[in-house]
Amino acid sequence: FAPINLATADLGRHVRNGEQLLSGNFDLLYKNYYSYTNPDFPFINHHWFGGVVFYLVSLISGFTGVQLLFIFINLTTFCLFFYIAKKYSNIYVSSIIALLILPVISYRDEVRPEAFSYLFAVIYYLVLKGFSEGKISRKWLFGLIPIQLIWANTHIYFFTGFFIMGIFWLD
């Protein structure tokens, strides 16, 4: 629940990206849009969809809503990973690891699209683990396709989805 320091945060840029994209300015997808010295330098905006989400949420509920969304995504991700750790280990080991990880998580208090990557990674794991254990049907795997498409345009860690699939495929 740290206050947003808009002078140093990237959130303003992400929100502005979403606003620009929804108004039809697609230059920021491939141009170094905010550079004064090198605006024509080739650039691929790999997190444009995160900006769209942040912009839409800011329209509804301002920066407070964006911060609450960020907290919700991080808390959901943490709880899901804790559930997985507890399920395949025990409450004691899971709690100790969670306590060790909390300072690292709390250090990243700035709203950033990477939160989506953490959430999508845990969803991938849950779906693939459920399928590999025979608890869910193959149809659930098709749900990973739209998640991957959203992920690839939300944050650069989208390759993690392919990595997780590869691990399950090797298994």
Image (cartoon, grey):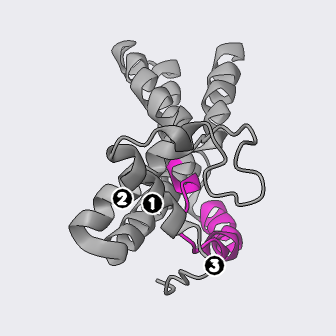
Q: Is residue 79 visible?
A: no
Say which element carries label 2: helix
Check disc 2 and give the amino acid type. Answer: Tyr
Tell me, yes or no, whether the highlighted magenta stretch contains residue 99.
Answer: yes
Check disc 1 and give the amino acid type. Answer: Arg
Q: Is residue 71 visible?
A: yes
Could you tell me how far apart the alpha carbons at marks 3 and 2 are, in whole angstroms? 18 Å
Q: Which residues are magenta?
A: 92-116
10 Å crowding of disc 2: few (<14), some (14-19), many (20+):
many
Say which element carries label 3: loop
Q: Earlier in the sequence, mark 1 or mark 2?
A: 1
At x 62%, y 23%, the residue is 165
Quarter-wise, where is residue 99 in the image? bottom right
At x 46%, y 83%, the residue is 1
Viewport quadrant of the C terminus: top right
Judging depth in this view, the residue of 123 and 16 nearest the camera is 16
**Do the residues under discs 1 and 2 have CB atoms within 8 angstroms?**
yes
Give percent across and percent down for residue 52.
39, 50
Check disc 3 and give the amino acid type. Answer: Thr
What residue is pinned by disc 1?
16
Q: Earlier in the sequence, mark 3 or mark 2?
A: 3
Give percent across and percent down for residue 101.
68, 68
Say which element carries label 1: helix
What residue is pinned by disc 3?
8
Q: Which mark is residue 55?
A: 2
